[in-house]
Amino acid sequence: MKPISAKHRKDRKGISVFTQPGKRFQTESHLCLASPAKQNHHLKLHETTPSLATSKPSVLCGQSLSPPPGRLLRRDTQATHMTRNPSPEPKESTRNPTRTGMRLIVPLQGVVQGRGGLILGSLIPCALFYFLQFYLKRHRSPPSNPPSQSPSAANLSELPRSSSRANLLARGSTGRANLSARATSIAKPNDSPYYIGLDRVREDPYDEIDNPDGIIQLGLSENRLSLDLIEDWVSQNLTDLKLGVGSQALGLSGIATYQPMDGLMEFKVAMADFMTEVMGRTVSFDPSRVVLTSGATPALEILSFCLADQGNAFLVPAPYYPGFDRDIRWRTGVELIPVHCRSCDNFTLSITALEQTFNQAKKRGHKVRGILISNPSNPVGNLLNRDTLYDLLDFARERNIHIISDEIFAGSTYGNEEFVSMSEIVDAEDADKDRVHIIYGLSKDLSIPGFRVGVIYSYNENVLAASRKLTRFSSVSSLTQQILVSMLSDKRFIQEYIKTNRQRIRTMCDLFVAGLRELGVECTKSSGGLYCWVDMSRLISPYNEKGELDLWDKLLNIGKINVTPGSACHCIEPGWFRFCFTTLNEKEIPVVMERIQKVVESCKPSV
Amino acid sequence: MEFESGNSQLLSKIATSDQHGENSPYFDGWKAYDNDPFHPTQNPRGVIQMGLAENQLSLDLIEEWIKKNPRASICNGEGLHAFKNIVLFQDYHGLPQFRNGVAKFMAKARGGRVSFDPDRIVMAGGATGANEMLMFCLADPGDGFLVPSPYYPAFNRDLRWRTGVQLLPVMCQSSNNFQITKQALEEAYQNAQKANIKVKGVILANPSNPLGTTLDRTTLRSLVTFINDKQIHLVCDEIYAATVFGGPSFISISEIIEEMESINRDLIHIVYSLSKDMGLPGLRVGIMYSYNNTVVNCGRKMSSFGLVSSQTQHLLASMLSDQEFTDKFVLENCTRLANRHEMFTQGLEEMGIRCLKSNAGLFCWMDLRHLLKEPTFESEMSLWRVIISDVKLNVSPGSSFHCCEPGWFRVCFANMDDETVKVALGRIRMFVGQRKDVEVQVKKSWHRNLRLSFSSLIYDETMASSPRIMSPHSPLVRATT
């Protein structure tokens, strides 16, 4: 009984990335091996549960300045230690509200110091605390949760939850903590609706014929529009002879044996050329500054490991890509501080807001090591203009911090606006280059995420040297590199591909935006990326994160479409959603619109 | 390096520290090789790489298979949507067929006596990535892991650099053939406790790198008992499992825990890879296999930082599912390794050089204690520098493996062809022969500098045999002589 219950609680909190059928590990199978360490592990699951339950509301309330994760983590560990006392039960119940209260008040003090006065400072926490209690009451006890409503409800079982605790107590003190704090905190990144939605699609994916009632994936920025071009190229060009396997000159030993961890030189050259092509041939990239990694995810992590120590922070214009939280914060211990952009500015970054956030962060004792921008922005899809980029560079120079520019969608721009790479600005400035680092990859622009190719392009020799060494943990398969060398070196194909791909994204975007407009739903004007940023704030009630998540839940469970809610992207205004449209084909747009319409209509009476 | 020093302060400790370990002699040897690599025709006097544990003996088998199955590597051929699905596939669970294939191969590499659950297979960027991932999952910065020495030098980098974990050597002695004893384990554990270090587990390579030996059943059982008593983790790096070419046969930890009933399986983790057993390090396939559900789940999320290319997964899925091929490969590979090992150790024995008796791996653990001037690590270092710069073999000194006794060297023999092995043996023979001469000379004339005279002898030899040029020298030579 005990382990089942532990699992049950785990699932309820939405740590359900592993809910793929047949892949979840049923702890039951190891019942016979119950021993101190095993208990310990369950014990920790229990311990993390309260913090999980509270983590969502804390985002809700302290949205403008979410509490530093490092501190939370430490508090969680403390909690784990506390359970070594013989009677953890009473403590847990008393500790809970105090902990959440602290977590709210600490960031709110920041708000107050920044803008408000004494009254706001005392009123807001009280009000928010009240809401929090209310929220908790609604969401904590499973009986009040009808199984069909919550996305993770399907995983709930009706088992009593207290049995494991009794067992734990019977065993008494259980030795030292078993896994690392990182492993224990795995729940954190995945209680985000972003990951929950992705999992739901994995379980029940839409298929026109096989599963017409399945969930349509609009939550993953994946480009399926131009895959036929790649496939054509492969079938025309890639015979076994060109693989380098059959060719006598090279042979398998030239590929299969140990190769430079940061990528084959030929691939770096091809990649630099491709980047130049994608960025509109306004800058040229130096192959010797290219470091290849297995995807942009490790590229970002490696760069973070190089630029910041544990506890340091990066400023990130928000809304931002939900994956940043996992990619950057999880193992490095680097914190991300959102710089809020608002709908009235079309979600463009303002240097004033940046300055303000920087100063606030400094006041709160954060050591800010850099700014992380995504350009074209993910999830908004707008571009940073030349002036802003210059301002950013000036800002970084004044404060002596780094700039990380994630330009992974550079080749997926389609509007009339001009895309300016950070490298262009740096080239023009010709001074102080070594604080600028660019992230790139082939997952979006060449739509081959499976091949896992990411790029760190840095102007800083030290960063290059360190990241080259760090690529030993995440290098690209040499066989894949070999294939891509021949593809990227086919200049005519690449030019043709980029052009056609842009056209197709544009067509899709126009169709999608027009479809939404017919339903009375507007988007921000976007010029790049594989998604649009949709304003549904008029459809949510109440006008806060809860309302937004309710609507998200409806879209997922009634409309059967998975989208990314703004709160997962740390957007400060509720009611915004990211819809990726490149996973669809044109025929599917009416289906999607119909589904959205169903949800929109169901919302209207309540507005 | 054209940047102001002021700015480098802006970088993290990880970027600026020395933790990458590339300043150790182990990497010096590589640099010497990189500067002057041996080539049978173009640079016959170059340094022969014997510091790289790479298996090139059976690559032809794989090449042949790929030629026969060209579609596997370019991912098309299984219906219309196959290509699209592979290209887009970025699920961190990995392709199901890939995991099945790996599970089957892992079982095969362990003689089919155990089976592995494909759902517990977690991908990582090589065994390097898998080892680091386990450290990330099991230990917090400052925690310690016991590791029997001598151990793989890059553990210092892979396991510690980003995770902040400490490695605490468990001393193994030549007197009992470097076996891991319970006393040594206990002692290391107690020492750590005294130093106030939280020991989170034991990590070891079985078959051992650098020893090339496999752990026997008794040792494995006592290890498991030890970690189970202490409730700490056991990480078994079994990347050389299919390189066991002689008796006694390899026993995996997974077999032991099947036999032992009252142990906590949550503490057992295995690292695997195809780099050594199949000789495919370029493909960067590392596997973490854990019996602990939380670790599997956590590792799976971490594998986003080192996913294997779906193209490569697809290729390997077909290759590893080809039972006929894998059967043949494992058998043939072991035969070739056995022959190579025999040839090399026989050659050494003829010169009076002994190696630790081994039955696995791509290397042997060579005993040169009799060639040391005195039993110190300084002496080992100077002998090693002579071997690199004058004998022109990049072997790895025992000190870089944290061996507690000076005079042992790891020599890799599977990353070259037979001819190169003969050249290497020839150089060693020459060296040992001259060393004896030198010893005689030293006895005659007390004041002669041993190293210089040796160098001059080599020079003579080079001049005599090749009238063209002397081989270019690495900076190391200048530094030491």
Image (cartoon, rainbow, N blue to C red):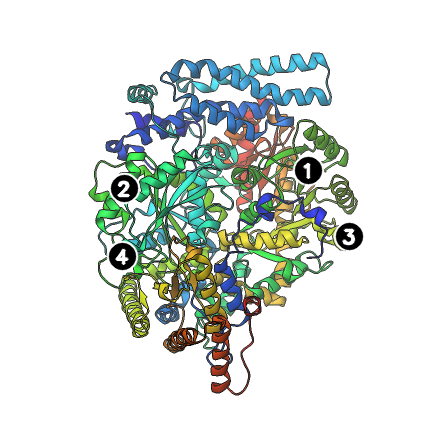
The residue beneath circle 4 is B108
Q: Chain of mark 4?
A: B
Q: Nearer the viewer, mark 1 or mark 3?
A: 3
The residue beneath circle 3 is A431
Q: Chain of mark 2?
A: B
Q: Quadrant of residue A573?
A: top right
Q: What numbered label is drawn on residue B224?
A: 2
Q: On the same chain: label 1 and label 2?
A: no
**Residues marked 3 and 2 touching at CB (< 8 Å):** no
Where does residue A140 sit, x and y in percent of width and height? 45, 19
**Element under label 1?**
loop
Q: Residue at x 63, y 32 (%)?
A: A571
> Which image quarter holds the N terminus of chain B?
bottom right
Q: What numbered label is drawn on residue A524?
A: 1
Q: CA distance from mark 1 to mark 3?
A: 35 Å
Q: CA distance from mark 2 to mark 4?
A: 23 Å
For the question of whether residue B411 can be seen, the reply is yes
Q: CA distance from mark 1 to mark 4?
A: 56 Å
Q: Establish if A399 lies above or below A83.
A: below
> Which image quarter holds the C terminus of chain B?
bottom right
Q: On the same chain: label 1 and label 3?
A: yes
Q: Is residue A487 left or right of residue A350?
A: left
Q: Is residue A26 left or right of residue A436?
A: left
Q: Amino acid at mark 3?
A: Ala
Q: Amino acid at mark 2?
A: Val
Q: CA distance from mark 3 to mark 2?
A: 59 Å
Q: Establish if A31 lies above or below B431.
A: above
Where does residue A505 sit, x and y in percent of width and height? 62, 50
Q: Which one is earlier in the sequence, the residue at label 2 or at label 4?
A: 4
Q: On the same chain: label 4 and label 3?
A: no
**Residues marked 4 and 3 touching at CB (< 8 Å):** no
Where does residue B3 sit, x and y in percent of width and height? 71, 53
